Amino acid sequence: MAMGTARRMPLVSRRRQGFAVVSAAAPRLIVMLLAVAAMASSSVAAAAGSPEVVELTLLANAREKGAVCLDGSPPGYHLQRGFGSGGHSWIVNLEGGAWCNTTEDCSDRKMTDLGSSKFMKAIEFEGILSNKRSQNPYFYNWNKVDVRYCDGGSFAGDAEGKDRNGTKLFFRGLRIWEAVVEELMGKGLATAKQALLSGCSAGGLAALLHCDDFRARFPQEVPVKCLSDSGFFLDAKDLSGERLMRSIFGGAVQLQNIRKVLPRDCIAEKDPTECFFPAELIKSISTPTFIRNSGYDSYQVGNIVAPGGSDPGQSWATCKADIRNCTSTQIEALHGFRKELVEALEVAQHRRGWGLFIDSCFNHCQMPFRISWHSRISLRLGNKTIAEAVADWYIGGGHGVKEIDCEYPCINPTCSSQLDL
C-alpha cells in the first residue's frame, strides 16, 4: 500500500464509535473478517498488480450549499476517468460505515474520516472500482466515483445539532448527495450513455434510498440501474426479543431528520423508522436494482440476531466467529433470519429487470474487494462470480439474474476459499 493512502474498508464503521448501542464483540468480529479479506485481497492483487491509488477531490463551494460533513468540513469523492468504450459510462459508488444515532456517537465520529474530510486520504480502487479488466471484466474502463461517507446517516439526513462540547454538528447527508451528484453532472455524468449507482452496507442502503432520484437525472433512453451490496438490513428480533436495528435506525432517523428520501406512501401510514428499512424501500423503487446479500450476513448475525447485550453468557461467541461452531439451536436461529430475509426479497424476485445474488456464506460486503468481486477464488452462484452475475444482469433484460443459495449446511464450496469460514 502506498504511503498516504488508505485501503478501503467501507463495510461497517472502522472504529467502535459508530456502535455505541451495539455490542463491542460484534464490531471486533467484523474488523477481523475485513482484515482477513483485505490481506487475502492484497496477496491476490500483488500477483496481478497493485490497485490504482485515486486522490481525494473536495466538493467545491460545500459550505455555501450547506453540504458538509459532521464537523462542517467539505465532503469528498474520488474520481477515476473512464477510457475507450467506457468513456461515457459511469459508476457512482456510495461508501458505507454504519451510522451515528446519538449526539455522543456523532461527536466521536466527527474526529474520524467517517465524519470529517480532514482525516480523509487517497484510496486504492479495487473490486468493482478496479481499472483492470482481469479483475473487473465489465466495468473496468468506466468512469468510477467513490463518494466518501461523512454524515453518519446513509446520505439521507438534513438537520443541525450540537455536540457534547456545544459546537455544531451538521447532519447534511442529503445535501451532500445532491451537491456531489450535481458537481459530477458537470464533470461528464450528465452525458453518460449508461450509469450504475452502487454501495455496500450503509452505502448499500443509501443506494436504495437514492435509486429512483439517480434514475430521474438522466434521459429515459439512458440505461440506469442500482446495486446494493449487503445493504438489506432487517428489522428482526434478537435473542432477547429486542429489535436493536430498529433502535439504531430510529435514533438516526430522529436525530438527523431523515424524511425527504423516504417513500411517501410508507410514511403516510407507518413510522418513518420502519420506512428506512429496505423491506419497505424496495416496494416503491421502480428502477431496476440488483441486491447482493448473504443469507447469514456476518454483520447482521453479530448485531441483529445475537448482539452482545442479548447474549450475556457469550454462548454465541464461537458461533459468530465461525458458523461451523454453531449448535443446532443457533443454526435454527440463523435459518430463521435467512427465511425472513428471503421472504422480504420476494418483491424483488418477481420484479422484471431486477437481480438477486443471495449466497449462504458468512460474509458482509463483497464488491469492494478483488478477491470476492472477481478472482479465481471468489464465491460463486450458478457458476458465476458476483462480477459476472452483475454484468449479466446489467446487460440483460427480463428477469435477469436471480440466484438464491441453499441454506446451511448445504455448503457452497466456494465459501470457504475466501475467509476460511
Image (cartoon, rainbow, N blue to C red):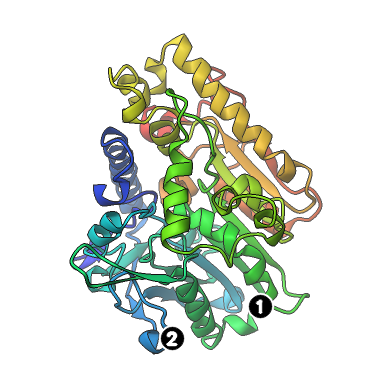
- Bin the neighbour count of mark 2 within 10 Å (Cα to Cα): few under 14, some 14-19, many 20 and up: few
Query: Does 43 sit above or below residue 287?
Result: above
Q: Is residue 384 left or right of residue 202?
A: right
Marks 2 and 1 sit apart, C-alpha to C-alpha, by: 19 Å
Which callout, 2 or 1, points at the residue further toward the start of the chain?
2
**Residue 77 % position (x, y):** 39, 73
Task: Look at discs 2 and 1 and give the one toward the viewer.
Answer: 2
Q: Is residue 60 visible?
A: no
Q: Amino acid at mark 1?
A: Arg
Q: Is residue 356 visible?
A: yes
What residue type is disc 2 on? Lys
Badge 1 is on which residue? 217
Q: Secondary structure at mark 2?
A: helix
> Which residue: 38% across, 67% down?
148
Q: Residue at x 28, y 54 (%)?
A: 105
Find residue 65 and name its label.
2
SS state under label 1: loop
Which x, y percent locates residue 285? 70, 58
